[in-house]
Amino acid sequence: MSKSKKRRKKSVNNKNIKSKKSYKKQIIIGSVSGVLIVAAIIILAVFFSKNPNADLIDKTWESYKAYNSSNEEVELSEVYNNYYTNYQGRLMFYNDGTFEIWLTVGDINDGTHRGTYTYSDGVINVTYSSGVEAEFHVTKDNDGNISNIIAPYTNDYDTYSVYFN
């Protein structure tokens, strides 16, 4: 009888050992799977995350109206000090963090100013290559798309807010 008891104990112990190994294996597989899933989510989020400057770049923004320091709408020809009634300035942002703004007539290189920019919370902070800093303000429509970029501009006569769209 003692022999049969020993056999039962062995068979019971073998089952416990097998179930413990199986349980540890499940924990390891579950942990590795969880880590892989989290890593995949992070990689996809980084890969598909939207560039914060995406709304600015790959577009030529053209001036269409301006206001003087008294908040009165003025003709763009007054701002640019020329006689072209349909004259429009140009503003461009690039993916490398640089921008160009062209505000005067003549050769494109005469009135083009360049610099760097950062965009955050509806404000574009620009630093011209001359070292002058300015803030361009962004307004958005109901769909969250940029409708206007408002840039300050000063000529020999007044200071203006020039609207680009």
Image: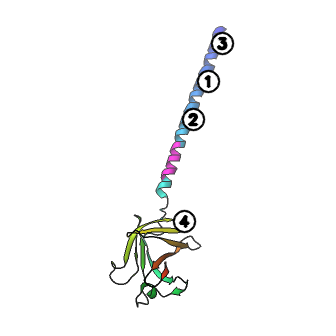
In what element is the residue under mark 1?
helix
Amino acid at circle 4 = Asp
Identify whether 74 is placed above or below 115: below
Name the residue at the right extreme: 1
What amino acid type should be assigned to the residue bearing mark 2?
A: Ile
Mark 3–mark 2 Cα distance, whole angstroms, equals: 33 Å
Look at mark 2 in the image and give the residue it sits on. 27
Residue tagged 4: 121
Q: Residue at x 43, y 75 (%)?
A: 91
Viewer-side label of 3, 2: 2
Q: Earlier in the sequence, mark 3 or mark 2?
A: 3
Of badges 1 and 3, the one in the foreground is 1
If you read the primary sequence from the N terminus, does the residue marked by circle 2 or circle 4 appear first?
2
Instruction: Report which residue position mark 3 lands on.
Output: 5
Name the kind of residue labelled 1 in the image. Answer: Asn
Q: Which residues are magenta?
A: 35-43
SS under mark 2? helix
Q: Which residue is mark 1?
A: 16
Residue at the image position 59 percent from the left and 31 percent from the top: 23
In the depicted structure, whether residue 56 falls above or below residue 81 = above
Label 4 vs label 3: CA separation? 77 Å
